Image (cartoon, grey):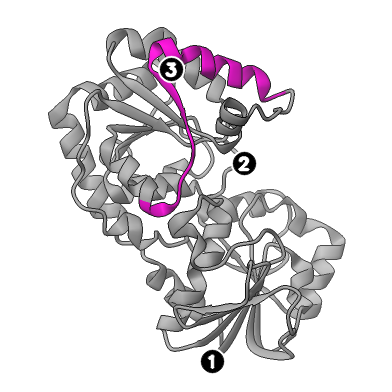
Amino acid sequence: MLVTLVDDSIPFNGMTPAYQPIGGAEKAFASLPAALARQGHVVRAVNRSPNSLSFENVSWIHWDGRKPPISEVLIAFRKPALLEFTRATRARILWVTGPPDYLHRPQVHEVLNRTDAKVVFQGNTHSEAYRTQGEDLVYYRSIAPGVREEYRSKEEMSPEEPPTAVVTTHPKHDLAWLLDLWIERIRPQAPNAQLQIYSAAFKRAQTAGDTLADDLQPIFEKASAGADHGVTIMAPAGDRDMAKAYARARVHLYPGSEREMYCSTLAESQAVGLPAVARPVGAVKERFTDRQSGFLAPDDDAFVENALAMLKDDDAFAATSKIARRSARSRSWDTAATEFETLFR
């Protein structure tokens, strides 16, 4: 079947995630086309790829290149207007990644009805958010993204000394709260532990002096001041290097946000075998099993207790890590592609 995927956002293609850091949503768009091609489909991805190229049997077409006149299946990424990018003879699918509030707007509802589009959400939390915001207006399915092979095939965990915690959350998602908890309660009980904050904006501010938005500056200053407490600002990396970083750590600390509909870095670190400690908000509860592959902490005391257990207790860490690896690795992009295929009819 001829499948066309369309995205109008930033420059990337199927090669990008392995070597460069990109957002979880963009990484999903970069990963699905090759999985569909492995299922035997003819696949084209139209976006702002730096160059038009063929990669893993997918034709990546630059946005300003020749527009495909027809497709059997059209998958529009995030923007309802893209559902009319080209003619589709069998199915049109809107793949939603962020909060679904906009789907209830009259103009969006009109596009969805006119194109007879099906909507794909990223999980139960995502579809629940849609249902609680108004009447169900469209046909929809929940299809969780896959986890890329760099994480699923990573060798055994090799945590280093001193014990390290990683945080990948956006700074606005309560990183300041986490820093206070680390400095005041966790580090005093694990005096050699390190906290690595992966933030592109903070790293640029630290190394190149980039100006941060007013609401980010005080958080950056708090993180920088945490150097005496084992806090280090790290540059996010491509999947190959992030998989290595997760394998060297002991715990993934995740404040969480009600607006997060998937939590991609949690899925990835779990597949490597990195236990998580997170607050039970947003889609966090879908990414791991509480008290097995990680810990949902309902309050500060529980967050501190479980973080310290992963940093200090070798047996507890090993048992939790083993379950994380076993459970999180089952979700491949080939599995996700098979579920997308059910919408092609």
Position in image of residue 238 (x %, y %): 45, 51
What is the quadrant of residue 309 in the picture? top left
**Residue mark closest to the camera, 3 vs 1:** 1
In the image shown, does 224 or 85 lie closer to the viewer? 224
- Identify the mark nearer the N-term, 2 or 1: 1
- 278 left or right of 215 in image: left
Local crowd at mark 1 within 10 Å, few (<14), some, or many (≥20)? some
Q: Which residue is mark 2?
A: 259
- The quarter of the rendered structure image containing the C terminus is bottom right
In the image shown, does 123 or 188 lie closer to the viewer? 188
What is the quadrant of residue 246 in the picture? top left
Local crowd at mark 2 within 10 Å, few (<14), some, or many (≥20)? some
Q: Which residue is mark 1?
A: 1
Position in image of residue 33 (x %, y %): 51, 75
Q: Which residue is mark 3?
A: 300
Q: Is residue 173 visible?
A: no
Q: Which residues are magenta?
A: 215-240
Q: Amino acid at mark 1?
A: Met
Q: Amino acid at mark 2?
A: Arg
Position in image of residue 215 (x %, y %): 71, 24
Is 159 above or below relative to 15? above
